[in-house]
Image: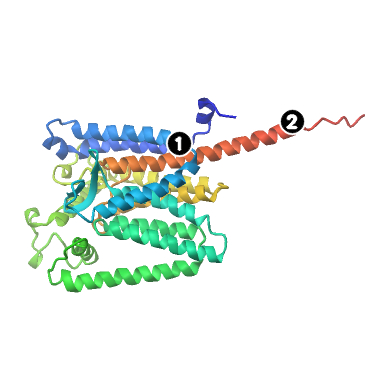
């Protein structure tokens, strides 16, 4: 019997919605301050925050709609999206194409009908659902081997296309897929073998590029042109103590004007974190950031540094707890799911949100090398906001279906008890 709208809303997972709205509220407050540079260069000072709020509002609508769709619909759509993202990722190999765009030296964007987005974001979403669907098809050892290599083949192709322009995203996707293989109880021999192969490839690539290109100050042409830049970032992170980016010969401070783009951003993000830490535990106060006016990507990749500067340890802790809460909630809900596809899908998406957030925060405070990971729902960026809203929509969709099934099961039990005739023992 079809459910009314009121009945459907009764089974909505309110906890996921609370998380979603808290992140959106924090995003508006934080970005209003962090986007001061954009406001300065814009004819309309409110234009940056207005567009951000518009994307957030659209994200709420997207999450609401997806929440009431059947989760079984996600699987065929995911295969189609994966194919579309693969085509667009291949298109980024050819920067001369009219709908392919290069921003800040990275060819990650395509524009269709005036809408600009990153194909890698579509690939992240669709690949998680496809992997979840494939894992539940494992029935025996023979099918396990076949499906494992299918997953590895698809993941390798997608990640290689992403790695050329965005190493951190490619590695992040690879890590999430590996965790899903572990959750899907794939034979440990396959997992160990995968780790060994990846380790050899990563170390081998690093050594080759380091010795033949970086140290000889040579460039690479073609799709791998950003590889030396990515290796240099890793070098600066690995040898930060020996080669402090703020110091030159004889320990003299290097002026900001003489630093390259990565050094400049890293230095200012560390200054922002230090300022927030010096005003323990609440930071310098909302809207009182100084580094936001100088940090080029204060509103996107380094927005967590501005959060720490303005809100201190208190604000940083709130964000960390929120993202950890998402993963904890997903673990708690999926532990009772009878549908293995739903369980793996929910865990994969929750891991993506939480791990991406942790990577973004770790970069801002200098724990990881420079990457281009936005803080989910907090950083400015239309594609990231919409895709993250889709993540939440799917989490809410699966949670709603599980709540409905639980309510139906309890109703059936109640009706079965009521149907049992009463026996008069005295008679």
Disc 1 residue crowd, few under 14, some 14–19, many 20+, Cα 10 Å: many
Residue 418 tag number: 2
- Please tell me in which quadrant of the rendered image residue 60 appears: top left
Image point (30%, 55%), residue name = 169
Image point (32%, 43%), residue name = 314
Q: Position of residue 123 (x, y in %)?
A: 35, 51
Q: Residue furthest right?
A: 427
Residue 285 tag number: none
Left or right of 166 in this view: 81: right
Mark 1, secondary structure of its residue: helix
Near-viewer residue (17 or 286): 17
| Front: mark 2 or 1 | 1
Mark 2, secondary structure of its residue: helix
Model colouring: rainbow
Image point (60%, 35%), residue name = 407
| Disc 1: which residue | 67
Please say if 305 is above or below 263.
Answer: above
- Please tell me in which quadrant of the rendered image residue 263 appears: bottom left
């Amino acid at each position: 019997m079809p459910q009314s709208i009121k009945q459907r809303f009764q089974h909505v997972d309110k906890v996921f919605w609370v998380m979603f709205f808290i992140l959106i509220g924090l995003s508006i407050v934080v970005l209003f301050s962090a986007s001061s540079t954009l406001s300065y260069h814009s004819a309309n000072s409110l234009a940056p925050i207005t567009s951000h709020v518009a994307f957030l509002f659209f994200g709420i609508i997207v999450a609401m709609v997806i929440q009431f769709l059947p989760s079984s619909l996600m699987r065929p759509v995911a295969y189609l999206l994966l194919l579309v993202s693969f085509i667009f990722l291949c298109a980024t190999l050819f920067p001369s194409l009219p709908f392919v765009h290069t921003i800040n030296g990275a060819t990650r964007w395509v524009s269709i009908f005036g809408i600009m987005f990153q194909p890698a974001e579509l690939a992240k979403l669709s690949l998680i659902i496809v992997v979840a669907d494939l894992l539940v098809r494992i029935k025996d050892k023979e099918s396990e081997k076949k499906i494992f290599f299918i997953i590895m083949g698809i993941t390798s192709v997608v990640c290689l296309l992403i790695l050329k322009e965005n190493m951190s995203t490619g590695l992040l996707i690879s890590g999430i897929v590996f965790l899903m293989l572990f959750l899907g109880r794939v034979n440990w021999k396959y997992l160990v073998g995968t780790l060994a192969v990846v380790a050899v490839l990563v170390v081998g690539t690093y050594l080759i590029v380091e010795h033949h290109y970086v140290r000889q100050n040579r460039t690479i042409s073609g799709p791998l042109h950003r590889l030396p830049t990515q290796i240099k970032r890793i070098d600066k992170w690995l040898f930060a103590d020996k080669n402090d980016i703020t110091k030159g010969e004889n320990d003299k401070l290097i002026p900001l004007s003489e630093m390259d783009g990565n050094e400049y951003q890293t230095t200012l993000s560390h200054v922002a974190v230090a300022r927030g830490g010096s005003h323990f535990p609440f930071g310098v106060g909302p809207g009182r950031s100084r580094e936001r006016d100088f940090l080029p990507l204060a509103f996107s990749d380094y927005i967590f540094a501005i959060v720490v500067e303005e809100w201190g340890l208190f604000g940083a802790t709130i964000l960390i707890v929120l993202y950890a809460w998402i993963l904890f909630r997903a673990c708690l809900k999926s532990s009772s799911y009878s549908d293995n596809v739903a369980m793996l899908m929910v865990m994969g998406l929750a891991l993506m949100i939480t791990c991406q957030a942790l990577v973004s925060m770790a970069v801002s405070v200098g724990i990881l090398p420079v990457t281009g990971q936005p803080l989910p729902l907090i950083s400015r960026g239309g594609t990231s906001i919409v895709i993250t809203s889709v993540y939440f929509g799917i989490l809410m969709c699966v949670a709603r279906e599980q709540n409905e099934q639980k309510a139906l099961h309890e109703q059936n039990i109640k009706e079965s008890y009521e149907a049992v005739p009463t026996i008069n023992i005295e008679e």
